[in-house]
Amino acid sequence: MKIGIMGAMREEIEPILELVTEIDTEIDYANNKYYKAKYNDYELIIAYSKIGKVNSALTAATMIEKFNIDLLLFSGVAGAINENLKIGDLIIATKLCQHDLDITAFGHPYGYVPESKVFVETDEKLNNIAKKVAKKLNIKLLDGIIATGDQFIADNEKKEWIRKTFNADALEMEGASVGFVCDALNVPFFILRAISDSADMDAGFDFDKFLEGSAKNSAKFLIEMLEELE
Ligand code: ADE
């Protein structure tokens, strides 16, 4: 089985490269680096996409179309909306949406374009594996809705709007774009995030302070999950 592991930022993927010791090759493609590695009996393709929906959609599509991955696991950080999520806590997405997609001028709901859907759902089997790992290791793991957009949110009003409009628990800048690509190409996917900030006026400061530690929490958990995959 070939597994794609992606993040958005170098800080999200470096801990994975450190934990996966057997790295075979580095491939440069489409302004990005893809690392081929082995873990147990799995072939891995590892990359960080760079921030945002376009970059992450390109990386997800490349992993599927060029490297033929069978499933995609995403690891990274997010801003918390749900008050039960504190810095460092983990959340897995049950479904994701694009909070910045807006053609409401034509009578459509936020996050919707014709011939598509507002929410894309993650793979239930992978989510259940994550829950099993969390239980085994006694790690707090929430599941919920993650809202994605090409904006770093550092504003309570904007955060509240995203909560109210999409019933979202966390927000970030890549999950939904990765999800919609995987969904269209029939590849099971999983989105894991550790909280780096609360998307409020302190978010910029908190993000800089907690990015590395939270990204490591997420990466470590993802590697634990590899032990439980069949
Ligand atoms: N990723 C982590 N924190 C974020 C925030 N506040 N806004 C957007 N993406 C994020």
Image (cartoon, rainbow, N blue to C red):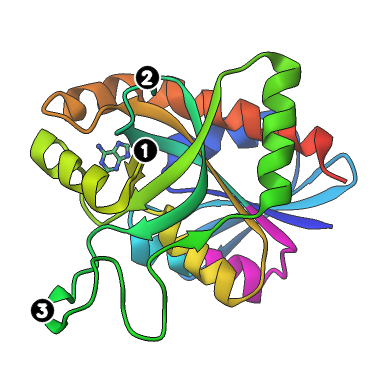
Within 10 Å of the Cα at label 3, are there few (<14), some (14-19), or many (20+) other Cα atoms? few
SS of the residue at dot 1? loop
Mark 2 or mark 3, which is nearer to you? 3
Of 15 and 72, nearer the camera is 72
The percent coordinates of residue 12 (x first, y second) are: 48, 37
Q: Which mark is on residue 87? A: 2
User: Would you say residue 31 is visible in this rendering?
Assistant: no
Of 93 and 182, nearer the camera is 93
Q: Is residue 65 magenta?
A: yes
Give the mark, 2 or 3, whose residue is nearer the N terminus.
Answer: 2
In the displayed image of the protein, which residue is found farthest to the top? 138
The percent coordinates of residue 129 (x first, y second) are: 74, 38
The residue at 15%/83% (across/down) is: 106
Name the amino acid, label 2. Answer: Ile
Mark 1 or mark 2, which is nearer to you? 1
Of 24 and 102, nearer the camera is 102
- Among the 4 quarters of the image, the one containing residue 130: top right
SS of the residue at dot 3? helix
The residue at 23%/53% (across/down) is: 165
Q: Is residue 164 left or right of residue 181?
A: left
Give the mark, 1 or 3, whose residue is nearer the N terminus.
Answer: 3
Name the amino acid, label 1. Answer: Asp
- Please tell me whether residue 85 is drawn above or below residue 151 in the rendered image: above
Ligand 1 resides in the quarter of the picture at top left
Disc 1/disc 3 C-alpha distance (Å): 26 Å
For label 1, being within 8 Å of ligand 1 is answered no
Name the amino acid, label 3. Answer: Ala
Q: Circle 1 sits on which residue?
A: 169
Q: Circle 3 sits on which residue?
A: 105
Q: Which residues are magenta?
A: 59-72
User: Would you say residue 196 is visible in this rendering?
Assistant: yes
Whether the residues at callouts 1 and 2 have beta carbons within 8 Å, the answer is no
